[in-house]
Image (tube, grey):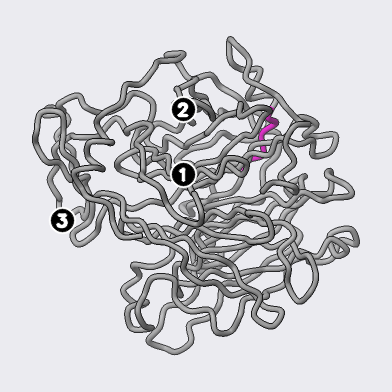
Amino acid sequence: MSAFALSTLTALATAFTLTTGPVAPVTVTAAVETPVVYDDEAGGNADADDPAVWVDPRNPGRSIVVGALKEAGLDVYGLDGRRLQHISAPQAPNEDAKPGRFNNVDIVYGFELGGRKTDLALVSDRGRDRVRAYAIDPAAVAAGRPPLKDVTASDAAPVFAADEAEVEDQHTSYGLTAFSDDDDAYVVVSRRAETRLRLLRLEDRGGRVGYRTEDTLDLPATFTLPDGKAWTPCADPGDRPQVEGMAVDLEEHVLYAAQERVGLWRIDLDDEEFEDPELVDRVREYGTPWTYDAAEEECVLDTAGDPGFGGEHLRADAEGVTVYHAEDGKGYVLASSQGDNTFAIYERDGDNDYVGSFRVGDGTVDGVQHSDGSTVVNVPLGPNFPKGMLITHDGEATPVDGDRAGTNFKFVRWDAVAKAFPEPLTIDTESFDPRDAN
């Protein structure tokens, strides 16, 4: 599918009305955290970003969490937060090339690989512009052995770059989400520093995982504001407003994509194609004029000149997106409001009306700041998470180690989130099973 006309998209971007919810975000606390990782040489340049949960079919309390650590690759954790396995990102193929850098991760169940149903962890490799696939071995999980094995096809081509030289420009694979449709499996990948999304179908290539392009969508880079003026979101020179956080409603096949400086999009996926995007909510900074400070290498917003066209529930950057599935289309879409360390919740059905916001505060473990990736699971995951769980990235894990910047993941009971609201959120552990979603 070709890019949509800008006039159509800008009309969609401004022709909606938001409902309001509780004014003040409620506060919840995490039950578990993973080990802190450090983005320096001593820490292997590890920078936690995005998590995914693999649900063990025989013992859900033995389920695992896979976390992307950017240049450091992947870590695999138990539900107690203990590290079970570390996987390094691929090395640079030559001295002039970039090494692998893992940004986002997601799970698909039951992909037919080498004649066997195989669960996969799929990762966007920003450094090499590929999708990497790792088979998950349930027997290894049960035995306490490292459960992930690389099964990426050797001929997997760059997702966006025309050739290896273009990979070095690093306008490469960035955000990623995965879903299944009958016997087929797909990933949606966003492009760093661009507005482009690409839908890929996974393929079995001699017992290894490859992919081919099914469709491409370009979200807008410039918007027409209600006063008729054109506005472009702030970005570094040469960059366009990118998407990272994404999730698919696994029953309805609807993609939710967070364009960081713009807002949250809803995009139906029909017959392996992207349908017309609809902007569900805008960031607070939407429409605000800005200048670029070259010395500080950052955008400076003219808040005094804010025309008031932004939303109320997301502060840039809009980041990690995840979907809580419940019966009859009920449930929620969650998005990280990175600018104020909160998470906004929208209804999954209807017009995705806003429900409320929450933050993860200090408790048994420290709270969450500047969260990138997140994922929610509705099914029971053992005695510590009997009503499901929410996992979030923490961009400022404490206690700190001197001047070293630490990050990790926080595990939160879903019932703790649900019951924190004056009108409790839905808890539905039975009507949806992520292992059976199509």
Q: Main secondary structure of the magenta part?
A: strand
Residue in the foreground of this view, choosing between 222 and 51: 222
Judge whether 104 appears above or below 408 on screen.
below
Residue 398: x percent and y percent?
Answer: 56, 42
Magenta run includes residue 388: no
Judge whether 183 appears above or below 53 on screen.
below
What amino acid type should be assigned to the residue bearing mark 3?
A: Ala
Count the marks. Answer: 3
Residues tagged 1 and 3 counted as in contact (Cβ below 8 A)? no
Give the residue at mark 1: 268
Give the residue at mark 3: 295
Residue at 68%, 24% (x, y): give it: 416
What amino acid type should be assigned to the residue bearing mark 1?
A: Asp
On the rendered image, what quadrant is the N terminus found in?
A: bottom left
Residue in the foreground of this view, choosing between 295 and 93: 93
Residues tagged 2 and 1 counted as in contact (Cβ below 8 A)? no
Residue in the foreground of this view, choosing between 67 and 122: 122
Which-is-in-front pick, marks 2 and 1? 1
Taking the image as shown, residue 334 lies to the left or right of residue 18, namely right
Residue 143: x percent and y percent?
Answer: 90, 62
Q: Earlier in the sequence, mark 2 or mark 3?
A: 3
Taking the image as shown, residue 105 lies to the left or right of residue 433, namely left
- Compute the Cα span from label 1 to label 3: 42 Å
Magenta run includes residue 412: yes
Give the residue at mark 2: 352
Answer with the quarter of the image where residue 263 lies: top left
Around disc 2, counting alpha carbons within 10 Å, would you say few (fewer than 14), some (14 to 19), or many (20 or more)?
Answer: some
